[in-house]
Amino acid sequence: MPKVGMKPLRRKQLIAAAISSIHEYGLADATLARIARKAGVTTGIIHHYFDDKNDLIFETMRSLLEDLRVEMVMQLRSAEGPRERLLAIVDASFAPKQFSVEVMTAWLSLYGSALNAPELRRIFNIYGARLASNLRHAFAALMPATEARRA
């Protein structure tokens, strides 16, 4: 019988191993066997929590975007005005956690892969639209609307 509460912990562990494997081997060569080895589990464990490699990669991307969203919300909560909102968006986007070598490698690999992977492309488009909306909102309070849309 599985341990209660194990699923989110195990998925997080496997996603971390996927990020590390993408950094070490590249996305194409980050096989389930390598990811499993890095996580200290069998490939069967990966298949228990994810349908296949594509599912794990998609969830890895969602996890990276969720980390960024959490950082953004945290930064925006303390922003008191439009200028501070704009700086909060920039600070969140360039937070140290987003710029670890492993995370940056994963971001770049996943961005490149999104060109040919509709599910990744869809989630990137959602992220891009949200970021653009946040930036437009911040700029709109600092300049005329026509300039804010171009900024």
Image (cartoon, rainbow, N blue to C red):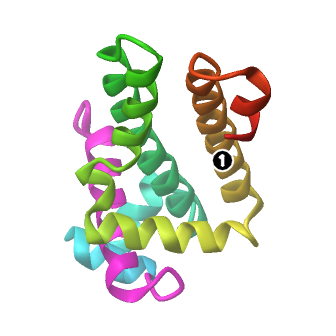
Note whether 54 is above or below 131 in the view shown: below
Q: Left or right of 82: which side holds 74? A: left
The image shows residue 76 at horizontal and vertical percentages of: 38, 21
Q: Left or right of 149: which side holds 123? A: left
Does residue 21 show up magenta in the picture? Answer: yes
Task: Tell which residue pokes out farthest to the top in this image.
Answer: 80
Note whether 117 is above or below 23 in the view shown: above
Note whether 71 is above or below 82 in the view shown: below
**Main structural element of the magenta stretch: helix, strand or loop?**
helix
The image shows residue 100 at horizontal and vertical percentages of: 26, 64
Residue ID at (73%, 66%): 117
Query: Which secondary structure lies at badge 1?
Result: helix
User: Residue tagged by mark 1?
Assistant: 123
Does residue 68 show up magenta in the picture? Answer: no
Q: Which residues are magenta?
A: 1-30
The image shows residue 88 at horizontal and vertical percentages of: 37, 30
In which image quadrant can residue 115 be found? bottom right
Residue ID at (41%, 12%): 81
Q: Quadrant of the N terminus?
A: top left
Q: Does the image show residue 41?
A: no
Q: Amino acid at mark 1?
A: Ile
Q: Does the image show residue 147?
A: yes
Residue ID at (38%, 82%): 33
The image shows residue 148 at horizontal and vertical percentages of: 69, 30
Q: Left or right of 115: which side holds 10? A: left
Query: Which residue occupies the foreground of this view, 150 or 90?
Result: 150
Query: Which residue occupies the foreground of this view, 143 or 23?
Result: 143
